[in-house]
Amino acid sequence: MSTSPLSPARADPSGVARQTSTARVIFASFIGTAIEFYDFYVYATAAALVIGPVFFPHGSATAQALSAFVTFGIAFVARPIGSFLFGHFGDRIGRKSTLVASLLVMGLSTTLIGFLPGYDALGSIAPILLCVLRFGQGIGLGGEWGGAALLATEYAPAGRRGWFGMFPQLGPSVGFLASNGLFFGLALTLSDSQFREWGWRVPFVVSAALVALGLYVRLKIAETPAFKAAVERKERVRVPVLTLLAKHGWPTLLGSLSMVVCYTLFYISTVFSLSYGVSALHIPRQTFLGMLCIAVVFMGLATPLSAWASDRFGRKPVLIVGIVAAILSGFTMAPLLGSGSLPLVLLFLVIELFLMGATFAPMGALLPELFPTSVRYTGAGVAYNLGGILGASVAPYIAQVLAARGGLTWVGAYVSTAAFVSLIGVLCMRETRDTNLM
């Protein structure tokens, strides 16, 4: 008797096989995004702490931070390219093999960054190679999320797609907690000189072991029922991206706009706030990293709560409430983060990351629901990653410039504006909760 993830319920009257295979699919969708986002957040944290001095040892600390944040943004430019590339094969060949390939690209790029010599050893070649590997990170992540979301939602039972789509959305919380926790441990055990010399490389190298785990899990899953049905009906299109642009441009745009708030909340409250807290507020690095570890737990708590609500009340109502709260949260940045008081700074981080989880969770179901099976991998991935360009690629850079010129009040206004952009996208969008993915 088959116990693959695609085994029909009638294969086991007791339902045990169906439950076991469902758990396998859920874990495969979760573990992949956890590892991929671990890799991505490792670089984000390093960019805020050491990438500038190691690879761009010129000018002031502000100039170094800006240079590091430029390399941070490169991956977001690469992500839509990755979503086009992997989306093509995901819609043409299948979800499983494409997800394996995206994990390999991401993991290899991250591990190599850990072994890359700095400017002192290679000169100007070092930042060039860093940019190349950072671009590779973006390509891999561009193909990861859409496939993981489809893996969960295309196998979800009726009425529970938001809940199933929540599991890849939990990956970022766990990935961030793992990467930030590792940096936190290094900050506690190493001196500043040791950390800058070699300690920051450890989380990058650890990625290799995590990728091996992810590959093991993903190689044991099979294709989703929706994709198999599309193959049997001969619904695959020759060039998915052309079909997407020609027939599904509007939902792609709205999906991209809806994602802006998630990215902005996260990267302003982590990457920018970490850099600002350490450099401008003079909060010890390990202290700020510890506060981020606490705050991201609230992001993880908000994720299942919001996913459940999206199944109960619909995607749009839940997102509208979360986005309106995010708009208001921009006004708390100056009084809370700017105070320099550790309890108030922690409160700001908790608010922002809780709202990130609340707005991010429904996206695991909503973005796949916007597109038909023939272009779903491409469409969900492109919408997700175009939102990354708008909401995250330049967010830390812009925040750094705004903080230098106008203070945290301007940065808070930037957060509110980004959330308002997402509100427009969601209001123009149709409710997708009852969409049939088959």
Image: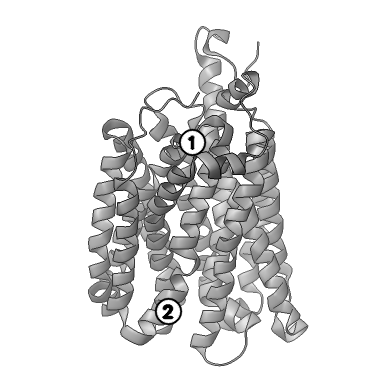
The residue shown at (62%, 72%) is 199
Question: Whole-percent x and y of residue 406?
Answer: 31, 84
Front position in the image: 200 or 242: 242
Which of pointers 2 and 1 indicates the residue nearer the eye?
A: 1
Residue type indicated by callout 1: Phe
Q: Secondary structure at mark 2?
A: helix
Q: Residue 260's image quarter?
A: bottom left
Q: Which residue is mark 1?
A: 371
Q: Is residue 287 visible?
A: no
Mark 1: few, some, or many residues within 10 Å (few <14, many ≥20)? Answer: many
Q: Which residue is mark 2?
A: 400
The residue shown at (67%, 60%) is 136
Q: Is residue 65 visible?
A: yes
Front position in the image: 176 or 79: 79
The residue shown at (51%, 74%) is 48
The residue shown at (32%, 46%) is 428
Mark 2: few, some, or many residues within 10 Å (few <14, many ≥20)? Answer: many
Question: Whole-percent x and y of residue 226?
Answer: 55, 25
Q: Residue 214's image quarter?
A: top right
Relative to 31, is 9 above or below? Answer: above
Which mark identifies residue 434?
Answer: none
Marks 2/1: CA distance?
37 Å
Front position in the image: 422 or 117: 422
Relative to 206, is 70 above or below? Answer: below
Relative to 137, is 103 above or below? Answer: above
